[in-house]
Image (cartoon, grey):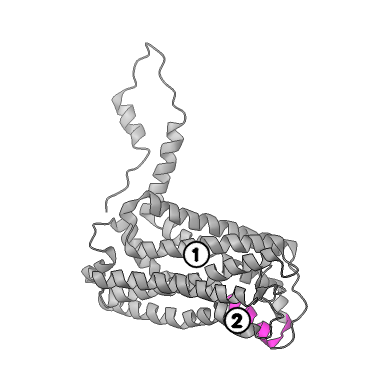
Amino acid sequence: MPSPAPPTELLPWERAVVLLSCVLSALGSGLLVATHALWPDLRSRARRLLLFLSLTDLLSAASYFYGVLQDFAGSSWDCVLQGALSTFANTSSFFWTVAIALYLYLSIVRAARGPSTDHLLWAFHLVSWGVPLAITVAAVSLKKIGYDASDVSVGWCWINLEAEDRVLWMLLTGKLWEMLAYVLLPLLYLLVRKHINRAHQALSEYRPIWEGRQLQRGSSAMADKKLILIPLIFICLRVWSTVRFVLTLCGSPAVQSPVLVVLHGIGNTFQGGANCIMFVLCTRAVRTRLFSLFCCRCYSRPSTQNPPGAPAPPRKRESQESGLIPEVPST
């Protein structure tokens, strides 16, 4: 790898865009976690995997926000701490994204169910939390995390560019798993789509993902099908990080292009926001519940009571007003 290029200067407007992306991603991840906590009937195993992915995205967005806000100029203690947190969250996000695709493949194509899926979920936890944690602890212990001049980041800290084996650690702490995901996710996605296209009339084949529960088809079932789109979102967002990594290896000055810097910043920080758009805002049943919850609070605030002796409002009007807040459909 060529000697490190001069630091990439992060312009104020670039910093503002990436910070906004971090905030939106954190809000989106938080909303996904809130919907999981509020409505137990939506807690299918597929959406439980999405919950863990949202938690990693939330931690990733928070650590990136601090790094972009600070715009480090050296390997200070908070630079190392931020780099360790973002490394763990980012790598764990890769593993959970692949775990979701693998779970969909096994549930839909292989029709896996029962105790086998329980063991599979434990394996997902062991790998998706354990491997990133082990890599991060090793990188911190060997003092590989530090200032990277924003050539392979956008203001935050990652692998210290002064390390002689920096390319190896860049691969171990993210890029290797990222590039493997580029191969595994489309493969699993195509296999699932191929199976769905063959058996689109036999809807009962897709019920293993529901765990046998009578979940609402307007929310959980549709959301579980939308989980197939997670790999596509992942690739579209992460590819800019890979492009800048390759340009850094080649010593190309294009790594400092403002367009690539902003795309890299948004791609690394916005996955939580993208998942929220798809699984909350674009999922009718979840969106209806949120709207109903918001309307209930809005209508309960102006609690004006009738003065003594005033006639009670007609029941017809009361029923009309109650219809302003639609009930969540059961199908």
Instruction: Classify mark 1: helix, strand or loop.
Output: helix
Q: CA distance from mark 2 to mark 1?
A: 21 Å
Q: Is residue 156 above or below residue 328?
A: below
Q: Residues within 10 Å of mark 1 (few under 14, many from 20)?
A: many
Farthest right residue?
6
Q: Quadrant of residue 4?
A: bottom right
Residue at 74% over, 73% down = 8
Residue at 38% over, 79% down = 188
Residue at 37% over, 38% down = 324
Q: Residues within 10 Å of mark 2 (few under 14, many from 20)?
A: many
116 lies left or right of 160 = left
Name the quarter where the C terminus is drawn: bottom left
Tell me, yes or no, if residue 303 can be seen here.
Answer: yes
Label number found at residue 169: 2
Instruction: Classify mark 2: helix, strand or loop.
Output: helix
Label number found at residue 262: none
Name the quarter where the N terminus is drawn: bottom right
Residue 158 image position (x, y, % from top left): 64, 73
Residue 237 image position (x, y, % from top left): 54, 71
Q: Nearer the viewer, residue 97 or 127?
A: 127
15 lies left or right of 226 = right
Q: Quadrant of residue 223?
A: bottom left
Answer with mark 2 or mark 1, whichever residue precedes in sequence. Answer: 1
Asked if marks 2 and 1 touch (Cβ < 8 Å), the reply is no
- The stretch of residues the image draws in magenta is 240-253
Residue 227 image position (x, y, % from top left): 39, 67
Tell me, yes or no, if residue 274 can be seen here.
Answer: no
User: Mark 2 against mark 1, which lies toward the viewer?
Assistant: 2
Q: Is residue 41 above or below residue 90?
A: above
Residue at label 1? 56
